[in-house]
Image: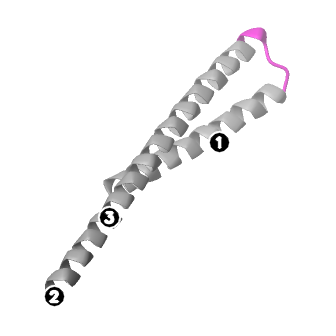
């Protein structure tokens, strides 16, 4: 359950990061910018891209961990069901 809250939080952060990235790209393509302003936006864009990539990596790991936990839960449930069926026969 805790893992799901982490996944939800990271998905929200990733979504926010992507919106910010779209805004920066829009400003870069929009009006004419001074070289300094363009460099600043490019730097911000690179930072946001790195942040988004890190969030995606974390999400991938959390989803993998979540899948493993689910499989373990299913295996335990099956074992308990088999044990119950064996002892009640």
| Front residue of 33 and 62 | 62
Q: Name the quadrant of the C terminus.
A: bottom left
User: Which of the two discs, 3 and 2, labels the residue nearer the N terminus?
Assistant: 3
The chief SS type of the magenta part is loop
Near mark 1 (Cα within 10 A), the count class, few <14, some 14-19 or many ≥20, is few
Q: Mark 3–mark 2 contact, CB under 8 Å? A: no
For residue 62, what is the image quadrant?
A: top left
> Badge 2 local density, few (<14 within 10 Å), some, or many (20+)?
few
Say above or below: 17 vs 46. Answer: below
Q: Name the residue under label 3.
A: 75
Q: Choose top left, top right, bottom left or bottom right for residue 31.
A: top right
What span is colored magenta in the figure?
31-36
Nearer the camera: disc 3 or disc 2: 2
Q: Mark 2 points at which residue?
A: 88
Q: What element carries label 1?
A: helix
Question: Which residue occupies the extreme bottom position in the image?
Answer: 89
Q: Mark 1 points at which residue?
A: 19
């Amino acid at each position: 359950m805790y893992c799901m809250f982490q996944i939800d939080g990271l998905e929200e952060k990733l979504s926010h990061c992507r919106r910010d990235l779209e805004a920066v790209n829009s400003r870069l393509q929009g009006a004419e910018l001074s070289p300094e302003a363009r460099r600043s936006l490019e730097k911000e864009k690179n930072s946001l891209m790195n942040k988004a990539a890190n969030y995606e990596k974390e999400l991938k790991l959390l989803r993998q961990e979540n899948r493993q936990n689910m499989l373990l839960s299913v295996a335990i449930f099956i074992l308990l069901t088999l044990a119950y069926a064996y002892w009640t026969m």
